[in-house]
Amino acid sequence: MIEELIARAKEKNLLLEKHRKSMRYKKILGRLVAMNLLRTTDDVLLNREKMKLNDLLWAGKIEPRILELIPAIAVKKPSAIVDLENAPEDLKTVIKEIKAANPISKFRKVNPKDYMQWLGSVGQRNRNPTKLKSFRFQKEDLELLKSFKLQGMSEIEAVRKGLKLLAQSVRRAELRDND
């Protein structure tokens, strides 16, 4: 019984070693190292080529960190992956959840907290993906935004500053009410 388990473990280890030496794996790992997402002591081929989704998924079976990285790359740097439009359903689901800021599904047995940790490392560092919101402004609001623009402030900067000031005002009012 134990000898059989040891024999199976040795077989699996030999197969993993064979895969780790393959060009397919070295190219994927090399691209991820070139993107400054992973570090390794393995001999890799640094490159800037786009990665095939099937190769990424395959390499993720060898190196678990790659499976953790795939959702973050798909959301923040989709141009790095070829054939992303044909992603498997579990990846499509996770991408939608990340974009909606509500990741709850596992991706290939990877928990959301494990793949979400990589979002700040991919693409623009330390920035989470933004979500598009559309609003209808009244004429007076548009004139205010235009006046801010003339002062060198973008529309989004004006809206963000306004939201922050409103949040501070609400907090102050709550503190006064609690006193």
Image: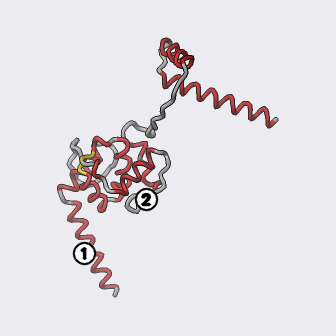
Residue 126 seen in render: no
Residue extending farthest to the bottom is 1
* The disc label shown at residue 33, or none: none
Q: Give the x, y percent position of residue 57.
A: 29, 57
Whether residue 63 is situated above or below residue 139 in the rendered picture? below
* The disc label shown at residue 106, or none: 2
Of circles 1 and 2, the one toward us is: 2
Residue 74 seen in render: yes
For mark 2, does the 10 Å Cα neighbourhood hold few (<14), some (14 to 19), or many (20 or more) residues?
Answer: some
Q: Amino acid at mark 1?
A: Glu
Q: Give the x, y percent position of residue 119.
A: 42, 45
Residue plotted at (53% across, 24% down): 137
Q: Indicate the secondary structure of the residue bearing disc 2.
A: loop
User: Which residue has dot 1 on it?
Assistant: 11
Q: Amino acid at mark 2?
A: Lys
Question: Which is nearer the eye, 173 or 61?
Answer: 173
Q: Give the x, y percent position of residue 113.
A: 48, 54
Q: Give the x, y percent position of residue 142.
A: 52, 18
**Callouts 1 and 2 close, C-beta under 8 Å:** no
- Locate the N terminus and report the quarter of the image it occupies: bottom left
Question: Which is nearer the eye, 38 or 78?
Answer: 78
Residue plotted at (54% across, 25% down): 159
Q: Indicate the secondary structure of the residue bearing disc 1.
A: helix
Whether residue 163 is situated above or below residue 36 in the rendered picture? above
Residue plotted at (31% across, 80% down): 6
Q: Earlier in the sequence, mark 1 or mark 2?
A: 1
